[in-house]
Image (tube, rainbow, N blue to C red):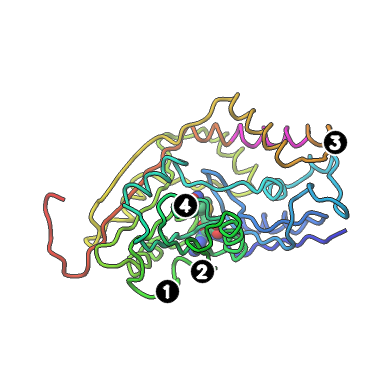
Amino acid sequence: MANLSLNVREQTWGTRKGCDGLDRACSRLRGDLSVLGLRVGIRALMPVCDVEVTDIARVGMETGAMTVPSADEVRGWPYVRLLAAMRESNLPPGGLDTVRRFAVELGLGPHTNVLHAGCNSGFLSRELARRTGCQVLGIDISPDMAAAANARSESEGLAHLARYEHRDMRDTGLDAASFDVVLSGGALAFVIDQPRAVAEWLRLVKPHGLVANSELWYHAEPPQQLLDKVAELIGVPVPRYTRDHWRELYNSPRLQPWALHDAEAGARTVEEVERYCAQMVDHVAVGWDDSAREALNERLLDIFLTFNQNMEYLSYTFFAYRVLPAGAEPLLYV
Ligand SMILES: C[S@@+](CC[C@H](N)C(=O)[O-])C[C@H]1O[C@@H](n2cnc3c(N)ncnc32)[C@H](O)[C@@H]1O
């Protein structure tokens, strides 16, 4: 049986205590799954740590040496193991509507050189490259996510447009003024020292270039019971940002507002969540017996119905700013 090793690689948000808890949970994972790499955290919510998983394959779907899990094993899987099984794409806050906004509002085209900060599996920048022909460099603090993004870019025939590297967005080591656009799809929420990350984005962008980001924030106070349940599910406390927090981050005389869009994140109906969970079971649990499939379905429902309730309290803002060179002419009616 193959040996799985998980390491909490870098804490990007949250308390050290939360990370230790996750670390302990990860270290308990041993088994016959192997996964390319994943981010522990979430959908619209509150990730915390990057987790590196060695060996490449899909959980429970392997043939030959790999065995499928029993229902009891699935019920006992820690949250991170479940995420590993799902290998879902991570979309920016606002989903495909936000992807379209990045493409249209930033005027991306074959002439545009784009940095995608905190790229995860690269869904956002692959889609932008596919639609607009822009040239993308995606960076992620997790080397596994950069590798996963490169693998997907290759398999989708986009490697000539979108490539990915392991770098920290707060200190990229890239040349100053080397991008027309720096964009990010909700990764900043997981970064410690966000002003440092934004300062680095401004260093990297050419004069008169654009920076853009989409981030989640709470427009209403969620019940503590719900936050506790979410924290229990993911094993760490839930970060709570406000809209003002994000506005303040871009409050610089070098930034002029270019585009702004606010919307509620929007929960799905219970039926939609149920359908999604059933589809995920079909997608993931190939060759599993009925009781293991049922156990997976129950676990997914528990998680996604809770996350979906949390979505009722969340909004997101898509921000884009024009970056002025030092000493630029001031403008009043921008
Ligand atoms: C929620 S995902 C962002 C993906 C996003 N939804 C998108 O569409 O681009 C957050 C990602 O940020 C990455 N990340 C966190 N801190 C980082 C840092 N300091 N530098 C680069 N990437 C970072 C994590 O590894 C993770 O893959």
Q: Is residue 65 above or below residue 282?
A: below
Q: Which residue is drawn at 58% across and 47% down?
A: 89
Q: Gap between marks 1 and 3, in whole Å?
A: 50 Å
Marks 3/2 in contact by CB < 8 Å: the verdict is: no
Q: Element type at marker 4?
A: helix
Q: Hey, what amino acid is under mark 1? A: Leu
What kind of element bears circle 1? loop
Q: Mark 2 points at which residue?
A: 167
Q: Distance between the residues labelled 3 and 2?
A: 41 Å
Pointer 3 or 2: first along the chain: 2
Name the side, left or right, on which 117 lies relative to 204.
Answer: right
Residue 13 in view of the camera: no
Examine the rendered structure and indicate whether residue 62 appears above or below residue 284: below
- Number of numbered labels in the structure image: 4
* Percent position of residue 198, x then y: 37, 62
Sequence-first tag of 1 and 3: 1
Label 4 sits on residue: 130
Q: Which residue is drawn at 69% across and 31% down?
A: 278
- Please name which of the two marks, 3 or 2, marks the residue nearer to the observer: 3
Residue under pointer 1: 174
Q: Give the range drawn in magenta.
A: 295-306
Q: Is tag 2's residue or tag 1's residue first in the polypeptide sequence?
A: 2
> Tags 2 and 1 in contact by the CB under 8 Å rule?
yes
- Left/right placement of residue 197 relative to residue 73 reads left
Q: Which label's residue is closer to the chain start, 4 or 2?
A: 4
Q: Does the residue labelled 2 lie within 8 Å of ligand 1?
A: yes
Q: Which of marks 3 and 4 is nearer the N terminus?
A: 4
